[in-house]
Image (cartoon, rainbow, N blue to C red):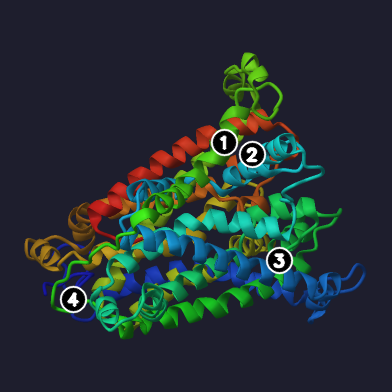
Amino acid sequence: MAPGIGSGVQISLARGWPSKSFDSGRLFLWATITILGVIILPPFAYLLSTSLTVEQARAPAFFGFDNFEAAWSRSGFDIWRVTLIYAVGSSLLAIALGGLAAWLAARTNAYCRGFALVGALVSMSSPVIVKGIGWILLLGPNKGVVNEALRGLLGLQGVPIKLFGLGGMISIEAILWIPVVFLLLLPAFSAMNPALEEAASMSGAGRAQVIWRITLRLASPALIAVALLTFIRAMESFEVPLLIGSPGRVETLTTVIYDSIHAGFRPRYGEASAYAISLLALVVIPLLASNRLARDGGRFATIGGRGFQGARIDLGGWRAAAGVYLALIPLALVAPLAILFWASFLPIYEPPSMADFGRLSLNNYRSLLDRPQIIAGMRNGALTAGLAACLVVAIASIAAWLASRRREPSRRALDILCSLPLAFPGIVLGTAVLIEFLHLRFIPLYGTIGIMVFAFLVRFMPYGFRICHASLAGLHPELEEAARVCGASGLGVLSRVVAPAIMPAISAAWIYVFLNSIRDLSLPVALAGPRNPLIATTILDLWHDGKIPAVGAISILLAMLAAFLGWVFTWLTRREGNAI
């Protein structure tokens, strides 16, 4: 291999400045590791330190476990029980419903298979807060469309469907995760060699026995991995517990952390940090189990050197019913957006009726430009997401290049540092970054959009790194070697050869970070204030103020933007051949 930064041979960054005693590539590697360490490690160090620091009104602070004791005495075991029930219940329900949909789409001749796939892809791009508010308008106790219809058509009294409670939280979280489960399990069922199933059928096993003893066991690594993923994400879920749990006085660890920071005259940062460390411990255990399972997945491989063509199961008379079930996936996206679309044209929200068609207008969309709060949220949201996306792709692409091209054992530190934020829920990371810059007052980021750019940089670094690293795996080093032979410096190779070659992956990573920074609420809710609102916090404030038509208008525009960016991201990743 020709010398350069990526090759591990000692040569300087400047063209034609070889040296046997100075390895600029190693220096560049350690500089990148240092930068990542300075960005990623301090928030969690400050979080741990704050959780163990006991503040006193008229005495010096001291180290101890008083914050953990206060957190436990305030909530007892109930908060842990509710959080675990919510996470386990929603993940199991999502696996059951989404797994069935994935099996129908991959292994049967059910109708609406392509329709379900498109609906799942579009649904992933829609912000959770938008869909959550939409489901409240559909299933809410007072003016919820479904409850109103049940009371009117069936003469039921009271609240037929009780949304605000633990059962409603589990149901809505599961519905929101069905498209993700569907997309993650679809490749596992599609790539499954049907030879074992056919052999079982020829041996006299019935269809139910084949599915239970063969299909599900072959798919068990994927099922367990997706179940662990949904459990982890439900544990760190914030939007659903806030929107649906809080009105029913049901709290999870994420909402308790939020209340510890925002409730009362004085934020309880010590208790918030103690809750955050506890939530982190609960998330890390299944995350480690998921990684261990991924390493052992080869034991369940069924695709070998011989080709195969899977035959779809003929459902016969059940084909139409299966198609209706698959159509529920796009319906779960359309229903909450449809009611928000209706609300966006009304001066005052009312459930849909023929009498209100005369009141429909575009005034809410026109008035968006007249509301300083909304303009500030949209401007700050776009600026924050754009800056965070640029920083993530710049740092992650360099880190991924060094991790894939260097040969020193220290290169593994890049992977570890870039993967570390995966273990930290959004509300935990937001709390950690908030505490960090409360201590580092000499860095003027507290209360500005800069603190949110930094938080999004840390949060989405793993995804940018993985996307770029996957693309670099398909780029042969010969291109870089040829450039070095022609006299290109290491940075020249990176900027003129590597970056253009993986530009689709870089673009996909940028869109992914931008899209998720726009739609994320768990970070801004801890860091945003009156001087630095974002789109997600603006929607939440409008919702709390009862301005449902304005919420509808901004939500529809945001959903349209997210759907477009999600489509571009999907197109880029398919072109690049990456599995995200």
State which tag comes first along the sequence, 1 or 3. Answer: 3
Q: Amino acid under label 1?
A: Ser
Query: Residue 99 lies in what quarter of the image?
Result: bottom left
Q: Are marks 2 and 3 in contact (CB under 8 Å)?
A: no
Q: Amino acid under label 4?
A: Ser
Q: Does 501 appear above or below 145?
A: below
Numbered mark located on residue 253 in the image: 3
Q: Are marks 1 and 2 in contact (CB under 8 Å)?
A: yes
Q: Is residue 87 left or right of residue 514?
A: right
- Secondary structure at badge 4 equals loop
- Where does residue 566 sit, x and y in percent of width and height? 39, 45
Q: CA distance from mark 2 to mark 3?
A: 23 Å
State which tag comes first along the sequence, 4 or 2. Answer: 4
- Secondary structure at badge 2 equals helix
Q: Residue at x 76, y 43 (%)?
A: 141
**Can you say which quadrant of the picture contains the C terminus?**
bottom left
Q: CA distance from mark 4 to mark 1?
A: 58 Å
> Which of the two residues, 56 or 9, is positioned nearer the viewer here?
56
- Residue on which the image places disc 2: 539
- Where does residue 50 sit, x and y in percent of width and height? 72, 71
> Which of the two residues, 387 or 177, is positioned nearer the viewer here?
177
- Secondary structure at badge 1 equals helix
- Residue on which the image places disc 4: 19
> Which of the two residues, 254 or 369, is positioned nearer the viewer here?
254
Q: Amino acid under label 3?
A: Leu
Mark nearest the camera among 4 and 3 is 3
Work out whether residue 107 can be spotted.
yes
Q: Residue at x 44, y 72 (%)?
A: 223
Q: CA distance from mark 4 to mark 3?
A: 55 Å
Q: Amino acid under label 2?
A: Ile
